[in-house]
């Protein structure tokens, strides 16, 4: 058989040749809508590749992007890896010191930055001595841009070159295509390097009917940012399928997203639970989004109540997907199988509240967090979820963690604790480091948090382990009371006593003003531990 | 990223772990139906792997199969390659001398043969000196089986071993998994070797929503034989998806196939045009097959009238797929795209009469048969169809043709002449060797045949090139007149004069009793050329 590499040039040339008539829409600053075609986009990809040459970017250099989900970002998604370079998507929500760290760690040669975000990046430029050029993309905003030899105007740059005329060639499918740093709830951010092979295979999995079944007829709105694990692969998969794409730009408020779903006849969209929680009240009912067929949700656990609220109001429940930066990211999706036929609405909602079944080509297993012993898939036994497959990381960039996150036989330790039923449906129970081991028994911090957050007086709750002489560890509940409500530690404990085993109930409850968050909006239990454990 | 091989053990273990409850049905000799589960099938695959060890089959040996589409054949489809050996599917319709040739050429070590087919194979055994064992599978038939040390009873063999207990491992994804010989309309049959990688990727393509979108909910009936290019990949893809499978066994008469479609709620099936021509009259209407959603058809051009007859009577048109042994085989499928929305029934039927669009990961191009110059995709320019991709052959086994079928840059010359429209829809025009080059202009033999076969008096027609001093070549029409009809050469020529350019009309018409066929039922123009050209 031919040794044709699985590489992004094939995806690009396929779209250019078959789907030149399909549309690519961008919603810009202030909501301005521009629509172009894949044919025009392809020319701009070719122009961008030539521009990278003109800038003297080495053929294996890292090219940073500091952008929202925009058509220009999609140009970079292809021009950078198809010309052999490595796309480094920078998370615009990182704290300044982390941003400086990852740009320097990845040794980015140039950074493409949208003008509205330029004010956030430029003050850090002097701390990024290896970045030769900042290419500023006009997004209609008016952020002042100083006169500096490091600054290049994107439009001027593209106009100064002729589009690359040949076919892109990447001979080695294991060549790096892109990289993304994990947000790092502990230690420094760590880089995950995606290969052409992993990117193509992950995109293919999104096209598989039982995974997401993305097709040419879809109109795709990626809400999850393109700086988070390739927006879950939706941009690459959409281009591979020839689907129409709508890029939301910086318009991340619920009202704007609801408007895009409605105005552009979106069929498939993807984002974190917070987004879909905010968007639902902005829609009046199924008639607003009659074409919507798949609402992918991941990044953190999707509350059953949220999925059910969508189902009841819009007629479309949320489909969970699970993964992480290290898994490209989609490892499981919660689409239903024939075994679920005939289940009651409530039982179906239970299935949908799992992370779903592993995608073809992905292998999962559960390992005891202490002994490493493999656990059965019986829906009861829990263990650390470990993953293997062609789009799962085998190391961090420059082996930053010394391999701690990987097993001796090369599987990724996801850090998630899960149970898996006999049909392969994964239910996440906790993060390994958030489990509380009390008197030899595991206590799930997530279970306790869910029970506490079910109290109407509670706005947020996080449970951490604190050292205990007798029990080794005990849970500590950190609770944020809703404005205008009153709550005592005793009330929290009494509530839990009716819901979990007595020995699982936290001895102490701390009332705090808010749960500290990471740059990606997740609970930072690390900060809580620093405060309450030291 | 992890270097996880794309190999069949993953597909097997996935099915074993996730889909053990799904069913595998076999329809045996005389129509007897047996249903088992994937869980039982998996144990038998493990038992078969152990049996190969017990037989002393080397870990990279070729294992022949001489079987219909049966559950046992599906066991061999996995046990052989998952244990590292190479599955060699023998075409039960080959002429004896070809069968002997390919068994010896592939150096088959053992052959698994169904008892009903044993009488066809055994008389050739002495001509296959390297075949150590013939494993006879009980299929309920009563073909006499002699007492010979080369003969092993399948059931006894399996009962004599313990199922292999570990995980199958194939580390090198480029390792050979299976092989199949092309039926060879010219010269000796040539072997195509499928790797694990090519087989997994081809199976994945069948799961892609825009290709065939095979899903877990499907109930798949593969009519195309498993000895023809892996039954178009349907068995591997169905197991990968966890779909239910119904294996038709030797029951290849239209009435039996119609019965299976009806009785087993089949959703997806695949076979050559002759099959669907025969089955249609056996169905009374859509109510017979309400679940049928995809009727894949390939192997030879699907007449527009046949697809339309299905659409009108059953409500489901035929979906063409195109490929060949050398392309695993699916390279294109004729599923529709958004550009076809709003077309009239007749225009849609025209689109469906093409071979469709290339599958993701497959690249096609048209090359001038003489100069090799690449032709545009304009729906008019024709050229030899050439293919590239990870499941397209790069050579024949033992380089049998000296590489003639492959271009200098490694693409497969398919031998088909085609035009491609701007959306990538491929219309096959002819076989390169059947084109007639007259006075410097190409004449399509297929076009002429279609026009002649549209005459009510004509049963079959084949057009070949004959040498001509003035024009280099001229077309010769070989026509079979329908029983009870009368036709003259002049009438054929007059009919054509109103339909094609005057210079394309054959000067001569030969009336023959029937068009000679190859072992796979295709027109053998080679035989006609031998007869009329010499």
Image: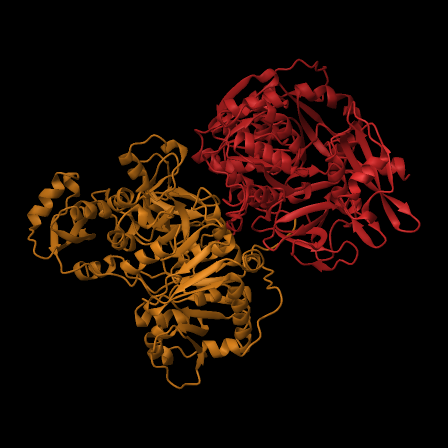
Chain colours: A orange, B red
* In the displayed structure image, the side of residue B101 where residue B219 appears, left or right: left
- Identified at 23% across, 42% down, the residue is A440
| Percent x, y of residue A19 | 54, 56
Q: In the figure, residue A337 lies in which quadrant?
A: top left
Residue furthest toward the right?
B469
- Identified at 62% across, 67% down, the residue is A166
* In the displayed structure image, the side of residue B246 where residue B104 appears, left or right: right
Q: Is residue B156 above or below residue A282?
A: above
Q: Is residue B445 above or below residue A134?
A: above
| Percent x, y of residue A68 | 37, 66
Q: How many marks?
A: 0
- Identified at 78% across, 41% down, the residue is B496
The answer to whether any part of residue A45 appears in the image is: yes
Closer to the camera in the image, B362 or B462: B462
The answer to whether any part of residue B79 appears in the image is: no
Q: Is residue A58 above or below residue A257?
A: below
From the image, which quarter does the C terminus of chain A lie in? Answer: bottom left
Closer to the camera in the image, B434 or B236: B434
| Percent x, y of residue A485 | 7, 53
| Percent x, y of residue A324 | 38, 54
* In the displayed structure image, the side of residue B252 where residue A188 appears, left or right: left
């Amino acid at each position: 058989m031919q040794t044709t590499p699985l590489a992004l040039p094939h995806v690009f040339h396929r779209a250019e040749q078959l789907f030149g008539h399909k549309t690519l829409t961008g919603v810009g600053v202030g909501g301005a809508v521009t629509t172009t075609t894949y044919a025009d986009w392809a020319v701009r990809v070719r122009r961008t590749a030539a521009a990278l040459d003109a800038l003297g970017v080495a053929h294996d250099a890292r090219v940073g992007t500091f952008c929202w989900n925009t058509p220009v970002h999609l140009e970079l998604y292809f021009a950078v890896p198809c010309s052999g370079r490595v796309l480094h998507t920078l998370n615009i929500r990182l704290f300044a010191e982390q941003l400086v760290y990852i740009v320097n760690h990845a040794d980015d040669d140039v950074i493409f930055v949208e003008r509205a975000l330029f004010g956030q990046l430029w003050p850090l430029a002097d701390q990024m001595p290896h970045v030769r050029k900042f290419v500023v993309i006009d997004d209609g905003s008016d952020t002042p841009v100083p006169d500096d030899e490091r600054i290049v105007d994107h439009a001027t740059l593209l106009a100064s070159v002729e589009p690359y005329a040949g076919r892109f060639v990447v001979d080695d499918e294991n060549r790096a295509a892109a990289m993304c740093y994990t947000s790092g709830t502990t230690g420094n951010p760590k880089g995950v390097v995606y290969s052409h092979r992993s990117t193509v295979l992950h995109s293919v999995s999104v096209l598989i009917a039982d995974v997401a079944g993305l097709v040419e007829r879809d109109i795709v709105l990626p809400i999850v940012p393109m700086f988070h694990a390739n927006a879950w692969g939706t941009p690459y998969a959409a281009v591979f399928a020839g689907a129409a794409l709508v890029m939301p730009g910086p318009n991340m408020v619920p009202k704007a997203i609801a408007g895009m779903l409605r105005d552009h006849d979106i069929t498939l969209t993807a984002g974190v639970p917070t987004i879909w929680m905010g968007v639902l009240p902005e829609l009046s009912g199924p008639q607003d989004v009659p074409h919507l067929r798949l609402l992918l949700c991941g990044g953190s656990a999707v509350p059953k109540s949220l999925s059910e609220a969508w189902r009841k109001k819009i007629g479309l429940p949320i489909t969970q997907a699970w993964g992480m930066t290290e898994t490209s990211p989609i490892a499981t999706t919660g689409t239903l199988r024939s075994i679920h036929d005939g289940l009651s609405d409530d039982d179906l909602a239970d299935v949908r509240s799992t992370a779903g079944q592993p995608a073809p080509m992905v292998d999962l297993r559960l390992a005891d967090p202490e002994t490493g012993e493999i656990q059965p898939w019986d829906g009861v036994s829990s263990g650390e979820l470990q993953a293997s497959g062609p789009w799962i990381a085998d190391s961090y960039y420059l082996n930053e963690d010394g391999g701690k996150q990987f097993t001796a036989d090369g599987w990724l330790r996801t850090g998630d604790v899960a149970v898996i039923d006999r049909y392969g449906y994964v239910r996440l129970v906790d993060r390994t480091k958030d489990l509380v081991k009390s008197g030899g028994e595991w206590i799930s911090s997530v279970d306790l948090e869910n029970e506490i957050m079910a109290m109407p007086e509670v706005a947020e709750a996080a449970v951490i382990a604190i050292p205990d002489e007798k029990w080794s560890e005990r849970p500590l509940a950190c609770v944020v009371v809703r404005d205008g409500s009153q709550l005592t530690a005793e009330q929290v404990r009494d509530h839990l006593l009716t819901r979990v085993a007595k020995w699982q109930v936290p001895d102490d409850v701390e009332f705090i003003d808010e749960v500290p968050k990471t740059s990606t909006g997740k609970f930072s239990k690390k900060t809580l531990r620093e405060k309450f454990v030291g």
